Amino acid sequence: MPISDPDDRSEKLSKKRAVHEETNEVQEQVKAELDKAVESLKEAAKEREEEENGLLGPVNLESCGTVDCNHRGTCLGTKKTYICACQLGYSGKNCEDTVCDSARDCNGRGLCLGTTSTLTCLCNLGFSGKHCQTAI
């Protein structure tokens, strides 16, 4: 059984911590998006109450559908106010963003975190740049 170098283990642990921190950042971004959606629903409920009291125009309670979520999620709410519960691998208000791909978005030289619109590449040793495009 080979003896592992303590520096290698330390480097691997450091990389794992970096990935964990990046994952936490992505989770915080998702939480912020959900908080915005909840606020939007609260505003819509207030508008609906005003509509029902005759202060605004007629109420449009037509249900939303999967088309409103780009056929990538389940739509909850009405056409006017809805939330998309996106399928695994998709995110965004209308499930328009996809999870980034390490091979494509980081040139196969690193680990991709985030979505195609907001991604971070954790480059392998020997590479740097936003998309791990530069050999060092």
Image (cartoon, rainbow, N blue to C red):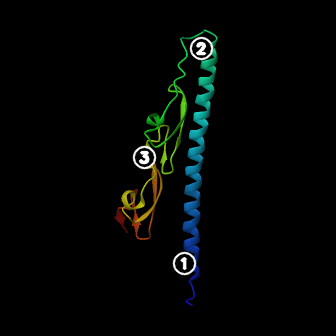
Residue 91 in the figure: left or right of residue 109: right
Q: Is residue 82 above or below residue 72?
A: above
- For the residue marked with disc 1, what is the amino acid? Asp
| Residue occupied by mark 3 | 117
- For the residue marked with disc 3, what is the amino acid? Ser
- Residue 125: image location, x then y, percent: 44, 70
| Residue occupied by mark 2 | 51
Residue at left offset 42%, top offset 46%: 117
CA gap between label 1 and label 3 equals: 33 Å
Q: Quadrant of residue 49?
A: top right
Residue 100 in the figure: left or right of residue 75: left
Of the two numbered discs 2 and 3 on the same chain, state the one appearing first in sequence.
2
In the picture as drawn, the residue positioned furthest to the bottom comes out as: 1
Tag 2 and tag 1, C-beta contact below 8 Å: no
| Residue occupied by mark 1 | 8
The nearer-to-camera label among 2 and 3 is: 2
- For the residue marked with disc 2, what is the amino acid? Glu
- Marker count (numbered): 3
CA gap between label 2 and label 3 equals: 37 Å
